[in-house]
Amino acid sequence: MTKHKEFEELIQKCLDREITVDENISLQLHLSQCPDCSLFYNELVSAEKEIIDMVEVVPNHGFNEAVLARIKTKKVPAWAKIATVLGSAWVVSFLAFILIPASRDLFTRILFSSPSIVKAVAKIYFVGSTLARIVTPFAKSQLNPTLLVVSILLSVGMFIFFGKLFSKKETVWNT
């Protein structure tokens, strides 16, 4: 950088090959008289030559495709995305329906209007609370999918077992 800003601009124009004849004459005259501007000009010219002489590195043909193939991520199927969204929406809406007080009253009125519905709700509540007791320790410590699947399968098995057990007790009580 020099103390002559107007000549710095002319040096830039000269290196960019945008300088006029009159500007070039003025620049050459100034460079012959000013050692700072002359040094600045020579540094820029040598830097330009070094840049031009640099070897251009171009990747081999197919390099981009090879890199993209190596870092390619697995594509999640559309059905898995849709199932996740719909399953989450179902769980959230079910929990909201049960947990919001106004809907809980409506839910209670509908469920307790028939004795068979009351029995079914009692069974579902029992299985749900059992499932919650089984799944909660796994979810708190670590959400290991294998343990989660095992606990769900055990819960379904218990649901079937207790369902048969309750149906046997009901037949004994009815006679």
Image (spheres, rainbow, N blue to C red):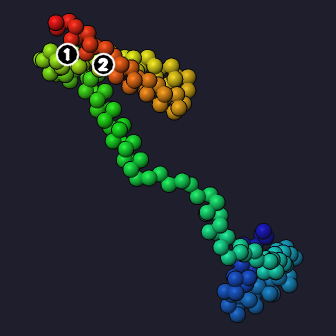
Residue found farthest to the left: 113
Query: Which quadrant holds residue 58?
Result: bottom right
Q: x, y percentage for residue 74?
A: 54, 53
Of the two numbered discs 1 and 2 on the same chain, state the one appearing first in sequence: 1
Above or below for 142 versus 39:
above
Q: Residue 163 — which label?
A: 2
Q: Residue at x 16, y 18 (%)?
A: 116
Q: Residue at x 33, y 32 (%)?
A: 91
* For discs 1 and 2, the disc positioned in front in the rendered view: 2
Q: Residue at x 61, y 63 (%)?
A: 68
Q: Using the image as rendered, state which of residue 21 and residue 135 is in the foreground.
A: 135
Q: x, y percentage for residue 130?
A: 39, 17
Mark 1 Cα within 10 Å, few/some/many (few <14, many 20+)? some
Q: Using the image as rendered, state which of residue 68 and residue 118 is in the foreground.
A: 118
Q: In the rendered structure, which amino acid carries the disc numbered 1?
A: Val
Q: Using the image as rendered, state which of residue 99 and residue 53 is in the foreground.
A: 99
* Structural distance between the alpha carbons of marks 1 and 2: 14 Å
Would you say 121 lies left or right of 139 here?
Answer: left
Mark 2 Cα within 10 Å, few/some/many (few <14, many 20+)? some
Q: In the rendered structure, which amino acid carries the disc numbered 2?
A: Gly
Residue topped by disc 1 = 118
